[in-house]
Image (cartoon, helix red, strand yellow):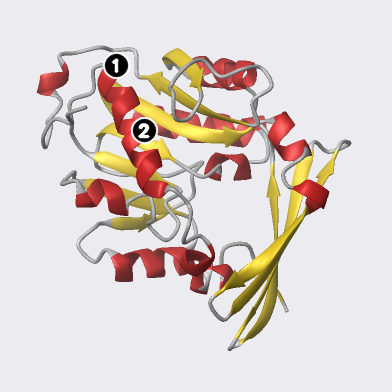
Amino acid sequence: MITPPFTALASVYDAIMEDVEYGAWGEFLLRVVTERGWSGGLLLDLACGTGNATLPMDARGFTVMGLDGSAQMLAVARRKLPEVKFVQADLTSFELPERFTLIYSVFDSLNNLLTEEAFSAMARHVYAHLLPGGFFMFDANTTVGLRDLWENGRVEGWAGEIYYRWEHLFDEDSGLARVEAYCETEQGAFTEVHYERPYDAPQLERLLEGVGFTDTRAISFPEGTPAPADADRIWVVTRHPKDSDPSSLDGERSWSV
């Protein structure tokens, strides 16, 4: 059975992604923005999925919200973190009453925006939801990364009683990567087909600064040093340009490094 992206997968996502280093990613992005002057405030986990990158921020005492387009993924997140506010909305058109000091997105979620126009629309809404001096930070697969995502274009394994098989193909003509995710569970088997577009550092700088962001940097995990030109995955940190005293940004508490 073929199901839409991030629907049936929600029921097995956490089991398959159990070893993903969400906690280390959270530590990294907090360290990076703190070094640039961030001192706390309201956070938004953009494309939060089942809340795996929301959880470490909540556990550290920050007030964090989550936003995602998948009702099924958010249902898992709400069961996991009932005290957190989660919102279902499109990344390219979301409107929230809150304003944030840090908006972040992890695990190449923004590669699911398949055109520059979609990425720019997302960036405009992020910009509009940041307080003056606020930060936007995310990771992205590059062209190098998506051309050779896995050896032989395939990865498979078991997560408890769940069998999964991911098959990957990069189409040079369209510039898109296609991932076919097949899972067998006690409830039956399903397949989801996902597409990702690569984003490289110069392109991201152009798109982000085109909507008003400033001081955009592509860096490597976990060092935080400038990302090499042949990096398969980069982290990007950028800022709303209207700087103000970070202590005035309604901080819940400061993050110590």
Badge 1 or badge 2: first in the primary sequence: 2
The single residue placed furthest to the right in the displayed view is 173
The answer to whether residue 222 is above or below residue 205 is below
Residue 219 image offset from top left, x and y in percent? 49, 21
Residue found at x 18% / y 43%: 62
Question: What residue sits right under mark 2 in the picture?
Answer: 28
The answer to whether residue 191 is above or below residue 137 is below
- Where is the C terminus found, in terms of image quarters? top left
SS class of the residue under badge 1? Answer: loop
SS class of the residue under badge 2? Answer: helix
Q: Amino acid at mark 1?
A: Arg
The number of numbered discs placed on residues in the rendered structure image is: 2
Question: What residue sits right under mark 1 in the picture?
Answer: 36
Task: Tell me if mark 1 has few (under 14), some (14-19) or many (20+) residues whose alpha carbon lies within 10 angstroms of its own.
Answer: few
- Is residue 240 something one can see in this rendering? yes
Give the label on residue 55, or none: none
- Where is the N terminus found, in terms of image quarters? bottom right
Residue 19 image offset from top left, x and y in percent? 48, 57
Q: Amino acid at mark 2?
A: Phe
* Most foreground residue, 168 or 82: 168
Residue found at x 24% / y 66%: 82
Residue 139 image offset from top left, x and y in percent? 51, 34
Distance from Cα at disc 1 to Cα at disc 2: 13 Å
The answer to whether residue 93 is above or below residue 227 is below
Residue found at x 34% / y 51%: 66
Q: Nearer the viewer, mark 1 or mark 2?
A: 2
Task: Tell me if mark 2 has few (under 14), some (14-19) or many (20+) residues whose alpha carbon lies within 10 angstroms of its own.
Answer: some
The answer to whether residue 246 is above or below residue 188 is above
Residue found at x 54% / y 45%: 109
* Most foreground residue, 4 or 200: 200
